[in-house]
Amino acid sequence: MAIEQTTQQRIIDSAFELIYAQSYAEVGVAAICEKAGVKKGSFYHFYKSKQELAIAVLEEKFIQQKSSILDTTFTGEHAALDEIALFLEKIYQIQSTLKETTGHVLGCPYGNIAIELSSQDEPIRKKVDHIFSRSIHSIRDCLQRGADENQSDLHGIDVTATADAMFAYLEGIILMAKTQNNADAIKKLAPAILNIRIYPNNA
Amino acid sequence: MAIEQTTQQRIIDSAFELIYAQSYAEVGVAAICEKAGVKKGSFYHFYKSKQELAIAVLEEKFIQQKSSILDTTFTGEHAALDEIALFLEKIYQIQSTLKETTGHVLGCPYGNIAIELSSQDEPIRKKVDHIFSRSIHSIRDCLQRGADENQSDLHGIDVTATADAMFAYLEGIILMAKTQNNADAIKKLAPAILNIRIYPNNA
DNA sequence: CTTGTAATAGACCGACCGGTCAACTATATT
DNA sequence: AATATAGTTGACCGGTCGGTCTATTACAAG
């Protein structure tokens, strides 16, 4: 008794898959419509522009992935640094599977869009910025708990800045893996995230 | 007595500026020609495709920037970690200036291209991969010297992996700065690069 | 049954895309 | 001066782009 997806949902899913595998500019509205089995008139009935669709896609997919990845990783059940290590392991698995199935390490769908469009499309840049903020929030909460509980040497760190730095490092190693088209780069560089620390200004 | 640039050079410079400020897909051959003051026929006299031009642009601009940035930073005259800190400081200055002059933190020209095109254009992906390799080589040499001289706690690190990790972190913080359109992110996150270490497998 | 609205259909638009081509000019060699 | 080659010109090509428009269908409320 499969509840069939709505037209809007098919458009969003198709757009995400195509844009993630290629790029925003490379994927036309016509291609999205074809993949979704929808005519152009319907597309523009739901979205007033390709940009508006992109923003909807980013928001919806992030909500999904936050539930399926972030919230299942940062549960507060394990030591902070263990959860962070698990997070990187999951990302390695995802990119590794992508390499096997598509032939390419596709990287971070939000980072990809940010880099392609940040200097050209302010609403999209802001949307990705907000998505990044929420992702970092999960890491920060994790670190805060670890610091409060005196785990590892987390006590005394600047939790916010350290979470930012860890997330930046994550995006960096994903970028390297994509550039090398090799997910193993993630595995190789992952351990160093656990040593990242930023301390308050005058420490 | 300005030696006027050749047609090829004007094409390369124009292409770099436009693509860096926007994106590969967004900048058409016609726009590059117009900015360079060249007709389309001339363009295709020198380059058989837009892709071939892009590869030439990447190589030429990297050679230039390696001379002007990498080679002037990693001189071997200072402590290894001081040179790395100086490197990040220079990158902050560059992105900060870009923000002032163009209104946008444009990020890493090679990383931008890598993310936009790696999954669609293998020759370009390989070119950026090679550029990254050469950049990391500069960092590795710096770290190797530091390790040999027992600077800081560099002795015993996996120099190659640590150089990879530091470069990844650099690309990550540049990505964050671009996404936030704020170069200060680089300044804030820069110090953590100095603590990054990866040790040999069974350490 | 009627009426209003949401959804679908698909032809159509001007602009632009990367790339081609034949003709022309400039320059160097003999 | 004749020839060959490198460089330049700009019109032209088929195809695709994001987006519009009018007509038609599906459906829900009265």
Image: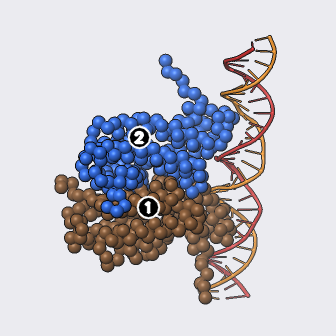
Chain colours: A blue, B brown, C orange, D red
The answer to which image quadrant residue B50 occupies is bottom right
Residue C20: where, in percent of width, then height? Answer: 65, 59
Q: In the displayed structure, does residue B146 sit left or right of residue B69?
A: left
Pointer 2 residue = A101
Q: Of helix, strand and loop, which one carries label 2?
A: helix
Residue A40: where, in percent of width, then height? Answer: 67, 36
- In this picture, is B1 found above or below A44? below
Q: Of helix, strand and loop, which one carries label 1?
A: helix
Q: Residue at x 26, y 58 (%)?
A: B198
The answer to which image quadrant residue B98 occupies is bottom right
Q: Residue at x 21, y 54 (%)?
A: B201
Neighbour tally class for label 2: few under 14, some 14-19, many 20 plus, Cα within 10 Å? few
* Inter-mark Cα distance, 2 to 1: 35 Å
Pointer 1 residue = B186
Residue A2: where, in percent of width, then height? Answer: 49, 21
Residue B49: where, in percent of width, then height? Answer: 57, 61
Visible in this render: residue A90?
Answer: yes
Q: Residue at x 48, y 40 (%)?
A: A62
Quadrant where the N terminus of chain B sits is bottom right
Q: Chain of mark 1?
A: B
Quadrant where the C terminus of chain B sits is bottom left
Number of numbered discs visible in the structure rendering: 2
Q: Which amino acid type corresponds to the residue marked 2 in the rendered image?
A: Thr
2 vs 1, front mark: 1
Q: Can you tell which mark lies on residue B131?
A: none
Q: Chain of mark 2?
A: A
Q: Which amino acid type corresponds to the residue marked 1 in the rendered image?
A: Ile
